[in-house]
Amino acid sequence: MRADVAIAGASFAGLGLACHLRDSGLDVLLLDRKAIGEKRASACGMPAYLADGLAPASILHRVGFFHIESGGFKRTVKLPEEYCVMDYRKFCSALFLRSNARFMKANVTGASEGGIMTSAGRVDADFIADCTGWSRALSRKRAPKPARTFVGMEITAPVKEKYGQSLNFFIDKGTIPGYAWIFPIGGGLAHVGIGGFCASTSLSRAFRRFLGKEQIEFTENELTGGVIPCSGLGSPVEGDIFFVGDSACQVLPLSGEGIRTTLSFSRACASVIAKVSNKEMTMQEGLLSYEREVRRSSKGFKALELIQKGFLSLPQPIFDLLVFVTTTRPMDGIAARSYRSIARY
C-alpha cells in the first residue's frame, strides 16, 4: 500500500496532523490498531474555542473556573478563557471526517526506509509521522529510560454538585504522589483521576484513598490509565520521521495539558510537509524547520518542568503559600498569560 503521508497513530496528534493536511492535496493515511475514537486516552479538557472550531457537537460541559484544594487551602478563580470537557469518541470522529484522510486498522510494528511496517503489510510514503504516543513506535533508537515516569489513571463517576462548574485539582502531599483532578462532564458526572511519579500499584492505593475522601465509589468501569509524558520536550524528528504529540513529549509539565499543544505542533508539522511537497524546501530543511518551531516553546516547557520538580519537593505549607500568591491579582493574570503563550494555537 502507498500514501503521500503515512501517520502512525490516530488519536489527537495523528488526527490533528491529518486535519491540517486537508487542503494540501496530499493523500493521507492514518494507521492505528484501534478504531477511530476507541478507548479514551485523556481527561479530555481543552480550551472551548478549540472544540468550538473543530468539533462543537463533542462538547459535554463548559466551565469558567479553576478550583484548587491544597492541604487545608481552597481557592477558586475565574479562568481567563472558557474551557470544556468533550466526548473523546465524538471529537476524534469529527476530526477524522474533517481530514478527508484514509484509515487502516493495523498494528504498527516499526519503520523502514521510506515506509512503515504494519501487521497488514508495508506502507510506503513520501512523508512519515509518528503519533503513537510515549512508546515512539517508529523510533529506531532505544530511548533512555526516564528516572521517573508520570503515570495517570481515571474513572467516570458521579461527583458532588459543587465541582460542576470548575476544573478541579487536589494537592495533598500526605496521600497523593502528584495531584488529583475532577473534570465535570455534565449530568452530575465527571472524569476523576490521579497522576504521579510512582508505580501504578502505589498510585492505585492513593487513588482509592482520594476517592474515599471525596465519597466517590471506585469502579473498574471505564478505568483508563497510562504514561503521561510531561517531563519536558522530546525529540520532534529522527532521521526522516516527524514526531508529534506524546511521541515527542509535547505535553505541558505541571498541568498535563496536551491537546492544545499537540494541535499547535501538528499544525506546524503539516505546514512543513506541505512546503516540502510543493518543493518550497528540501526534506532536510523541512525537518530542521519543524524542529526549530517546536524548540521555540522549549523555554516555556522548561520553566513548567522546573516548577513541577519544585512542587514535588516543597513542603505542603510553602506550596500552599505559592498557590495563594499565584492565584491573587496581579500574579494570576501574569501566570495565566505566560502559561497560555506556550504553544498557542
Image (tube, rainbow, N blue to C red):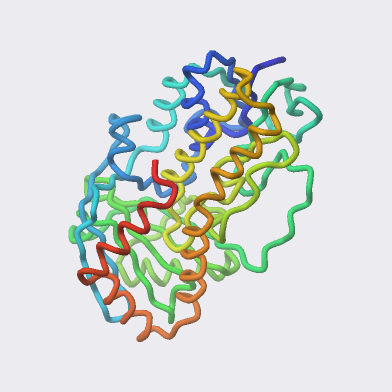
Q: Residue at x 35, y 45 (%)?
A: 46
Quadrant for residue 62, please give it.
Answer: top left
208, 191: nearer the viewer: 191
Quadrant where the C terminus sits is top left
91, 218: nearer the viewer: 91
Task: Look at the picture and state if 212 lies above or below 241.
Answer: below
Residue 194 pos. (x, y %): 44, 62
92, 251: nearer the viewer: 251
Task: Look at the picture and state if 300 lies above or below 105.
Answer: below
Task: Look at the picture and state if 108 lies above or below 335.
Answer: above
Q: Residue at x 72, y 38 (%)?
A: 138
Task: Look at the picture and state if 324 lies above or below 228.
Answer: below
Quadrant for residue 207, please give it.
Answer: bottom left
Residue 64 pos. (x, y %): 20, 52
Marker count (numbered): 0
Q: Residue at x 30, y 61 (%)?
A: 168
